[in-house]
Structures are given as structure tokens and as C-alpha cells.
Image (spheres, rainbow, N blue to C red):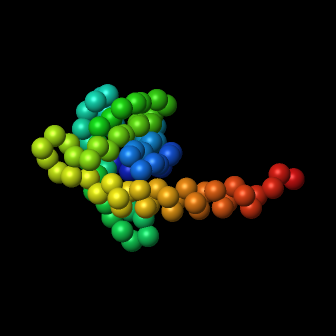
Amino acid sequence: LHCKAALGNISAEGIFLRLEPDDPVDLELNSTVDVEITSDGETLLLHGIVRSRRDRGYGIYFPKRIGEGSANPLDQLARISAELQRDLLSTRILRRPE
């Protein structure tokens, strides 16, 4: 089952994703999921574990590897996370309340 999700938050080890209200996905805590992240033409496939859920959103943790299975490219995720956070910080610094 595939669905699109909006980014709520990202870090070097995890992500919070928000789903559309009418999306049929219902993820259980501690279930495993695959998450595809695309940023600036680069696509990462990450294997994660659902650690939290609230308001149609899910917190997903990306360990170094799931069991004896596939390894996660956490160094690439850390770089993307830092770039996104830097962009958000720049936006926050430039805006002033009127």
C-alpha cells in the first residue's frame, strides 16, 4: 500500500509524517514501514519503525538497520535533515511580525 505524506518534522534518525484525512492507511505502533524521501532530485529508501501516532500523523524512527535486513543510509538522511532545517531557520530569521 502506497500513500503520499506531508513532512511534519525531520531529524537525522527519524521523521514525522502527516497523512491526508481520507487516506486509508492505518499504521500500528512498532510496525515496520518503508519510506521514500525525495529531495533535490535525490531519492532515499529508508526502513523504519512506527514509534508514535497522533492526529493522522506518524513518528517513524530509522535505525541503522532493521534486524538483519537492509541498512539505512542515515548519513544521507542527516545531510538532508540539516539542509531542510537550515532552510527553515533562514525563513524564520527573515520574517518579521508586522
Question: In the image, what residue occupies the spot 26% across and 53% down?
Answer: 72
Numbered circles on residues, count: 0
Question: In the image, what residue occupies the spot 28% across and 30% down?
Answer: 30
On the rendered image, what quadrant is the N terminus found in? top left
Left or right side of 18 for 35: left
Foreground: 87 or 1? 87
Q: Residue furthest bottom?
A: 41
Question: In the image, what residue occupies the spot 46% across and 56% down?
Answer: 81
Residue 27 seen: yes
Residue 51 falls in image quadrant? top left
Residue 27 horizontal/vertical position (percent): 31, 33
In this view, 41 is above or below 38: below
Question: In the image, what residue occupies the spot 39% across and 44% down?
Answer: 14
Residue 49 horizontal/vertical position (percent): 29, 37
Q: Residue furthest left?
A: 68
Foreground: 15 or 68? 68
Residue 5 seen: no
Residue 56 horizontal/vertical position (percent): 45, 34
Left or right side of 93 for 50: left
Foreground: 31 or 27? 31
